[in-house]
Amino acid sequence: MGSDAAAGPDISARNATLCTACGLCCDGSLFEAVRVDAVEIAPLEQLGLAIERGDEPRFNQPCTKLVDRCCSIYAARPRICRNFACALLKRLHKGDVTLDQARGVVATAQTLRARVAEATPPARGIAASLAAAPDQDWVAIVDPAMRLAAARRHLDQMVLRDYLATHFRLPGDKPGAGGGEP
Ligand code: SF4
Ligand code: SF4
C-alpha cells in the first residue's frame, strides 16, 4: 500500500523502492481484508474490486489489483491503502533503518513467506493461514516422516508470524482484522 501522503520526493522514492519489492500489505500476508469507506464502494467496484458490503465494507486479500507487487490502481486506491505505512516503512522514514537494511528485511520476509506458501498453499492468503489454528496436529502423527514434515511446516509458520510481527506490524494490528489503520 505504501503511504506517500505528505511525503517529499526523497521519501516517495524510498517508498517506491521498498514497497515495489514487497507488497506484503496487499498480498494477504499481513491482512485478510481491507476496509473501505462507504463512498468508495461504487468507484472501487467500477474498477473491478469485489466489495463485501455490510457494517464494515471491505475487499479480501490477496488483492486482485496487486500486479507484480505493485498496485495497478495506484492513483485510485482506497483511503486506507493511501494512508497505510507498515512499521518497517515508518522506521525507514524516521531514519532508524537504511534503505538497504529495509530491503534486506523485505527479502527475508519474502523468503520465509515463500516457504510457508509452498508447503501449505493458503486458500485465501498467508494471513488467513497464520491466523487459523496453527498446525499442531503433528504431535499425534504416528509416521515419523510425516510427523517431521508437519513439525517443519508448523515451525515455518511460527517463524514467519514472528518475523512479520517484529518488522511489519504496528501496535493494534491484528492478523485478519482487515486493513491496517495508520
Ligand atoms: S488497492 Fe492497491 S494498495 Fe490497496 S490493497 Fe489493493 S493493491 Fe494494495
Ligand atoms: S508491507 Fe510495508 S514495505 Fe511492504 S509494501 Fe506494505 S508498506 Fe511497503
Image: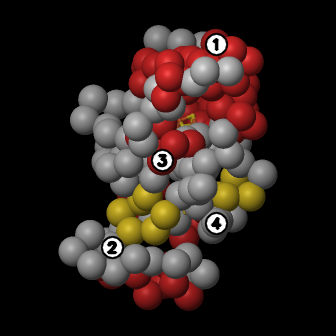
The response on whether ligand 1 sits within 8 Å of label 4 is yes
Give the quadrant of residue 112: top right
Q: What whole-number distance in Å separates the C-alpha atoms at marks 2 and 1? A: 36 Å
Label 3: state its secondary structure. helix
Q: Residues within 10 Å of mark 4 (few under 14, many from 20)?
A: some
Label 3 or label 2, whichever lies nearer to me, is 3
Q: Nearer the viewer, residue 106 or 178?
A: 178
Q: Residues within 10 Å of mark 2 (few under 14, many from 20)?
A: some
Q: Amino acid at mark 2?
A: Pro
Residue identified by numbered label 3: 128
Q: What whole-number distance in Å separates the C-alpha atoms at marks 1 and 4? A: 29 Å
Residue shown at 48% from the left, 37% from the top: 130
Q: What whole-number distance in Å separates the C-alpha atoms at marks 1 and 3? A: 28 Å
Label 2 or label 1, whichever lies nearer to me, is 2
Where does the C terminus fall, quadrant-wise?
top left
Mark before the other along the chain sequence, 2 or 1: 2
One can see residue 50 in this view? yes
Residue identified by numbered label 2: 57
Residue 34's x, y, as percent? 42, 59
Residue identified by numbered label 4: 64
> Quick check: 144 above or below 17?
above
Mark before the other along the chain sequence, 4 or 3: 4
Label 1: state its secondary structure. helix
One can see residue 86 in this view? no
Residue 102's x, y, as percent? 61, 19
Label 2: state its secondary structure. loop
The tag on residue 80 is none
Residue identified by numbered label 1: 101
Q: What whole-number distance in Å separates the C-alpha atoms at marks 4 and 3? A: 16 Å
Q: Residues within 10 Å of mark 3 (few under 14, many from 20)?
A: many
Give the quadrant of residue 76: bottom right
